[in-house]
Image: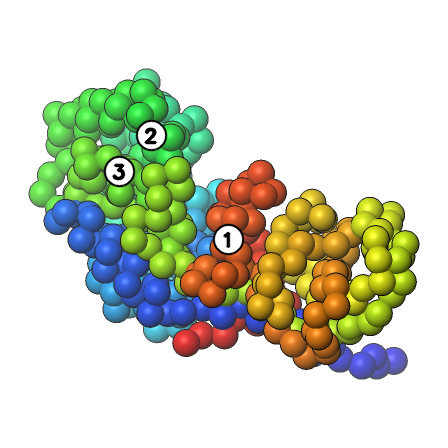
Amino acid sequence: MSFPTTPAEVTTPAEARVDLSAIRENAALLRERAAGALLMATVKADGYGHGMVPVARAALEGGADRLGTAYVREALTLRAAGVTAPVLAWLIPPGEPLEEAVAKDVELAAGAPWLVDEIAAAAGRAGRPARVHLKIDTGNGRGGATAADWPALLERALALQAAGTVEIAGLWSHLACADIPGHPSVEVQLDAFDEAVGVAEKMGAAGPGVLRHIANSAATLTVPRARYDMVRPGIALYGLSPVPQLGDFGLRPAMTLVARVALAKRVPAGSGVSYGHLYVTDCETTLALVPLGYADGIPRHATNQAEVLAGGRRRRIAGRVCMDQFVIDVGDDPLTEGDEVILFGEGSHNEPTAQEWADSLGTITYEIVTGIGSRVPRVYR
């Protein structure tokens, strides 16, 4: 028995418009702020929801030297798309396609001897040495070797380097609180990183060409000491401030999320709207249905909270955000089917920004932009 096939891609009547010139400009600004350090553009999570391959190309055009991903498969996607710039993948659980990664010149991070061994074995099968960045946990408490385990990691990597299967290409860590201005842990972590690098130097694992890197977006922009040989900005590349309380740093948001009204109708006073009737009209009014919902990354708790721009005016979401849709109350304004609704964008036309959405929902811009689902097509300009 045969069944009808499903289209490979199902999209909503909405789009996330990504301005690649903003990506290029932000990369250029970050390169300038790196003050001579190399710039690694972080393009993990499908380019923070913006589209990994187009963003990677735009970042390189803007002056990025390298690219960073979380997963090996993300790096391999870049290679499959013809991106040849150096790329580092840094979140590697057991069983990843390491042989293919080494064969395609993907640099790999390791924070434990077992992983260095797996990478070396893959390099042996690939017939070429693997370039490895060794991670020290300086206080973030996630990946990386502790200070106590760091010498053993270095010793194992050095042995494999002598055997010709591994090349130590970097020493790195990640800051926990760089987005909190003046947080004392930043200096503590930088001191710990310096100590770890010092250990590596004494053991012969920090020779010429070995990159030291720890700076995320916030540290790139606000902590000169953290820049070392390379910086790894992520959210700033997309034009969103990593430290919003200090301003936008001249960054330009790249994503504008838009939809078109699917239905507009007049309803009387006292009409309940959406599940649970959490919004009730207080007079005769026009309700407009917007075809985006929590399946597309519109948080359910945006109910009666987040604003959009429609008909030239800000409107608050009216009632419960549903899986595929939400409603706005437009009063007596002549909004009708097909009219554009801007959920968030650059902010230059009175539309809300991703930062405003994040602030109103008690979250961060990272979650807003990376949450936009695959049903929403990305359109580039």
Residue 148 screen position, x and y as percent:
32, 18
The residue identified by callout 1 is 354
Whichever of callouts 2 and 3 sits on the residue coming sooner in the sequence is: 2
Q: CA distance from mark 2 to mark 3?
A: 8 Å
Inspect the image, locate mark 2, and give the three-letter code of the amino acid beneath it: Pro
Whichever of callouts 1 and 3 sits on the residue coming sooner in the sequence is: 3
The residue identified by callout 3 is 222
User: Mark 3 falls on what kind of element?
Assistant: helix
Inspect the image, locate mark 1, and give the three-letter code of the amino acid beneath it: Ala
Residue at 81 percent across and 50 percent down: it is 279
- In the image as oriented, which residue stretches furthest toward the left? 208
Residue at 18 percent across and 53 percent down: it is 32
On the rendered structure, is 298 left or right of 329? left
Residue 175 screen position, x and y as percent:
34, 32
Inspect the image, locate mark 3, and give the three-letter code of the amino acid beneath it: Thr
Count of numbered badges drawn on the protein: 3
The residue identified by callout 2 is 181
Q: CA distance from mark 2 to mark 1?
A: 21 Å
Which quarter of the figure has residue 4?
Answer: bottom right
